[in-house]
Image (cartoon, rainbow, N blue to C red):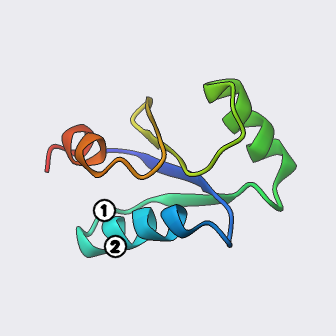
Amino acid sequence: MVTVKIYSTPSCVYCKMAKDFFKKNNVSFVDYNVAEDIDKAEEMVEKTGQQGVPVIDIDGKIIIGFDKESIEEALGL
């Protein structure tokens, strides 16, 4: 089973699209609200070097933004 983490903010449209995609495809994920969780925001910046969301971590593969093709490939969909 893959581990999926998404670093997001409540107002981010692409974050919502990514989470909706995961739900539609029955992919469980952990959502980190980096607008409220400073530690997770710092973790996200350490992984990517940037502050843009969403940042999606699928078993260590980092995907920046809602890149559907990359997400499907990483999930084997």
| Residue 23, placed above or below residue 46 | below
Provide the residue designation for mark 1. Answer: 27
* Place of residue 71 in the rendered image (x, y in percent of width and height, measured from the top left): 30, 46
Q: Residue at x 13, y 51 (%)?
A: 77
Labelled pair 1, 2 in contact (Cβ < 8 Å) = yes
* Place of residue 65 in the rendered image (x, y in percent of width and height, measured from the top left): 48, 47
Could you tell me the amino acid type at mark 2? Answer: Lys
Q: Residue at x 29, y 52 (%)?
A: 68
Q: Residue at x 68, y 25 (%)?
A: 49
Could you tell me the amino acid type at mark 1? Answer: Val
* Place of residue 2 in the rendered image (x, y in percent of width and height, measured from the top left): 32, 44
Provide the residue designation for mark 2. Answer: 23
Q: Residues within 10 Å of mark 2 (few under 14, many from 20)?
A: few
Q: How far is mark 1 from mark 2, CA to CA?
A: 6 Å
Local secondary structure at mark 2 = helix
Q: Residues within 10 Å of mark 1 (few under 14, many from 20)?
A: some
| Residue 21, placed above or below residue 39 | below
Q: Nearer the viewer, residue 31 or 52?
A: 52
